[in-house]
Image: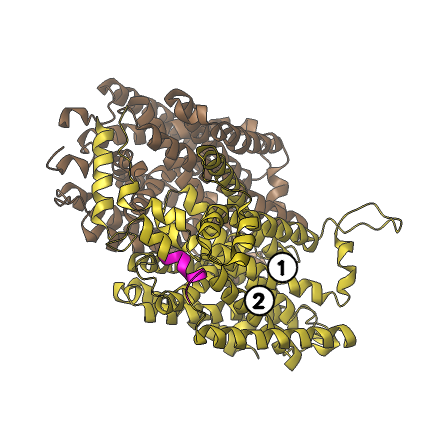
Chain colours: A yellow, B brown
Amino acid sequence: MATEVHREVHEQRESARPPLIGPGHNFATVTDKISALALSRPTSRRWWLGFGFSFALVMLLLLAISHLLVRGVGIWGINVPVAWGFAIVNFVWWIGIGHAGTLISAILLLLHQQWRTSINRFAEAMTLFAVACAGLFPLLHMGRPWYGYWLVPYPNTMQLWPQFRSPLVWDVFAVTTYLLVSLMFWYVGLVPDMATLRDRSTHRMGRIVYGVLAMGWRGSARHWQRYEAAYTLLAGLAAPLVVSVHTVVSFDFAVAILPGWHSTVFPPYFVAGAIFSGFAMVLTLVIPIRALYGLHDFITARHLQNMGKILLATGLMVAYGYLMEAFAAVYSGNPYERYVQVNRMIGPYALMYWALIACNIVTPQLLWFRAVRASPVALFGVAMVVNVGMWLERYVIVVVSLHRDYLPSSWGMYSGTIWDWATFLGTIGLFLSLVFLFIRFMPVISIFEMRTLLPEAKVKEELP
Amino acid sequence: MSTALQPVDFPPAARRSAFFAGALGLTVIVALGLWRPAHSFRSYLVAFLAWLALPLGCLALTMLHHLTGGRWGMALRHIWHASVNTLPLLALLFVPLLVGMGYLYPWAQPEVVADDEVLRTKQLYLNVPFFVVRAGFYFACWLVLAYFLNRWARRSPSTADGEEPRCFRLLSGPGLALMGLTVTFAAIDWAMSLEPHWFSSIYGVMFANGQLLAALAFAVLLTLMRGPRLDPDVQRDLGNLLMAFTMLWAYLAFAQLLLIWSGNLPEEIPWYLRRLDHGWQWVALSLLLLQFVVPFMLLLSRAVKRDPRKLATVAALILAMRFVDMWWTVAPAFPSESPLWRCLDLAAVVGIGGIWLGVFLGALRTTPPDLVVEELPHA
């Protein structure tokens, strides 16, 4: 049958590719190596240094928030006309970073991309931490975060309902759903590994904590069957969320009729940008961790290559978005639309615009070359540049569009104050602290899924 | 083994009847053209754009598959190749549109432009010579891509280890980027500029996705109808892919509708007002139900994806709705004509479609069944 030939060709091609797991591993070594990171390996001085530095930044965050609560949002640089400054820029930046996790876990799982296995756990954790950082900003931006629950629709004596036509309210639902589903997905995926750690832990405390988290997992056939069903269902639930969250974020801008915001290409282009920045952040974190903890056998050159290709593809989609925005502005013949584009290119913030083009469009073109994709150092460099570029993109969208709108009499300028920067750096510290804790106490790579990649896990299926 | 690799096969009678139907349809359109040239060209444009979606979508899918690999594509590849081979015919069929430009595009009518300030500012882009040069460039890009992909595929590309030659991937990456740009600007030039005041930056993405959806549904339909039985896993993957592109269609359509509806700007909203009035609202409703809701619900079911006949029915529905969608997108641009008056569009769809199908079936016969698999030593 033709289909058998197709299958054979496919398998031949698969086997011709570099393997997803280094040579010489078996079930025991995979388990040992990954669980040792959390259980037996002594906490290194470098870990303490890194964690200490990140935690110092968390202290800075707490200071900035306390000052904000005492003095109000006036300590930030926001003004009229630029009422959305760093808070929204950072919110969109963080939430974008949080997209790679679910994409890798859910969509690549549904597409049978096996190379996702060694990076999915890590990327999901990163997603949660990034969404946590993102969630802080709209709350703080309210000025009175303790009234945050007013955004939730519930019958109350004040007869107060949120404005359902506002995308900002949709954001509350989209981001909360995303956080909850990502958390469940991550945790459900962790359960079998928690049981492994529980069984191998030599410390009483470790046995208790991992034991509680493992929820009585014994690895029986029925457990595995239920687990597989639950995990696939959650993947199916999570997949649309990858698209929905950043779509709603793009509506925050595009539903307004402000030139520079009101563009129909925003939803797909924001989603592409989110995946772009998410993969850049995964690379930024994975490459050093792989080198420091010697995980070359599990996170192979092929993984890095594939992530480089996704970075290039999504980067091209983002470039397409910029092009369409610029073209629509010129083509529209609308003087306000045209002015926004001109103001971006040669206005007071032109430097940021061109830096953004250099970071997000020019630099990723290096990824066309195999040599760049094969070099971890070069990939890391490109990913860092993209991280910066994506922050600049949001800055240009938020600030440059707002600071000069229809009425020249209400034009103004904006720049972040020291408290804006302190809050931003503080969330980076929070993010990194959580990453450090995660590396120290959790299995950074899914142990049981890695075992399924081993040759002895392959059972030859009988063809019907 | 090679006997098992039957191509999707149609009897010669199918080709003959396709050509006959095509000739009949084109005769009606030409006859109409002698009486009311504007109407004739309008119908012709809708049909041309609808059929162009198939070879262009197949070209993009071929390149996409060269980049991603996967078993789902191998079963469909020879259909894509045959479809891509019809591109020269479509370049030829484009020529009448150059003749009819003055009837179709307001910006190509000097007296309209003279009275319209917005159109005067747009003349830098929307003018006749530049339009012709751009169209030539788009077709040149597509034909060059098609030529190389087919040539390499015919030249026994497989090496012993089953790895495809690198040239495919080296061409497909930049090729897809080029496709994205040329299809976008072709959509802007040929369809969006029918209403030259209106613009939407998502338009090119919608057009390209529509082409991919049409081409995938077409190839799946043909394979399931006449080809070898598919592996159940591959068949399920194809069903899922159809569902993914259907969802993407709904996503893009909804995004544009929501943003334009909520903005309610005088330069944007007329596009929807024209398409939700004069009977077009029923066409829009049918799109919502039959291009999205029904196929989506059906493709969720594993039983539908497993049964070749049911999956083929869904693919046929999706493909048919692609034509309705193109009609709804393009035809209301022409002032105050209700769908009933536009029944003659069907003649153009049959006319171009008959000729296209005839040429396609011919190409299918001369295309090797699976260009890569056939050359393998053990096949």
- Quadrant where the image shows the N terminus of chain A: top left
The dot on residue A253 is 1
Disc 2 chain ID: A
Residue B120 higher or lower than A63, as above or below: above
Residue A314 higher or lower than B228, as above or below: below
- Quadrant where the image shows the C terminus of chain A: top left
Please state which of residues B284 and A90 is positioned toward the viewer in this rendering: A90
Residue under label 2: A397
Dominant secondary-structure state across the stretch colored magenta: helix
* Contact check, label 2 and label 1, Cβ < 8 Å: yes
The x and y percentages for residue A108 are 41, 47
The x and y percentages for residue B75 are 27, 33
Give the residues drawn in magenta, as a range: A33-41
| Mark 2, secondary structure of its residue | helix
Dot 1: within a 10 Å radius of its alpha carbon, few (fewer than 14), some, or many (20 or more) residues? many
Disc 1 chain ID: A
Instruction: Answer whether residue A38 is magenta in the image.
Output: yes
| Mark 1, secondary structure of its residue | helix
Kind of residue indicated by mark 1: Phe
Please report the residue visible at 57 percent of the width from the left and 39 percent of the height from the top.
B335
